[in-house]
Amino acid sequence: MNQPAETDAQQRDSLPADLDPTALAGPYIFPDNNRRRIPGIIYLVLAAITVGGVLLADGSPLVNNGLLLGSAALALVGLYHLQGAWTLKVDDADALVAANRAVGFPVGHASAQMAWRGLRSRPTWRILLYSNESPPEKRGLVFIDGVDGEIVAQYVEENPEEWANES
């Protein structure tokens, strides 16, 4: 009944199928913020149904003003979702091109990240760029609006990182 211990060759780590990057068929498409409209509409419909239920069941011991307060909160959350449902018109590739133009040096490595700014959650690309030397001499950070492609902010500096020379 004793089972032999697994050797290193038999014991292997593997990713689950849904996390396997080799299974991707095509480029990654960044999700659009306009998906926020779906929960926003659901919240508004639920708020309207709640108000309708309160009006129909007026005088019932099961209905009180707390339901109206809850429906008002649902309506406010729904409206907030709708106003924050910006359509993303600038994708990551367009943002990388705009950032490359903005920094004024030839770009080697770059990284794009989606962030949201302000109370209205406007989508903004944050692009980190390094110059194409080895090791990079400059780096830059550029914020690009995801709706209209406007450069919100940019910062370029000499690369302060210490790079070890590998032989």
Image (cartoon, rainbow, N blue to C red):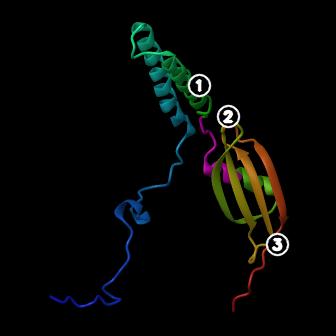
Q: Secondary structure at mark 3?
A: loop
**Which of the two labelled residues, at mark 2 and mark 1, occupies the earlier sequence position?**
1
Q: Which residue is mark 3?
A: 160
- Give amino acid for label 1: Leu
Q: Mark 1 highlights which residue?
A: 76
Residue under circle 2? 120
Camera-side residue of 26 and 120: 120
Q: Of the residues tagged 2 and 3, which is closer to the observer?
A: 2
Which residue is located at x 29 percent, y 88 percent?
Answer: 6
Foreground of the two, 90 or 36: 36
Q: Are marks 2 and 3 in contact (CB under 8 Å)?
A: no
Name the amino acid type tagged 2.
Arg
- Placement of 126 over or under 164, stated as above or below: above
Left/right placement of residue 156 relative to residue 44 reads: right
Name the quarter where the N terminus is drawn.
Answer: bottom left
Q: Is residue 66 above or below residue 138?
A: above
- Number of residues whose C-alpha sits closer than 10 Å to that of mark 3, classed few (under 14), some (14–19) or many (20 or more): few
Crowd band around label 1 with a 10 angstrom C-alpha radius: few (<14), some (14–19), many (20+)? some
Residue located at (54% from left, 41% from top): 32
Relative to 11, 79 lies left or right: right
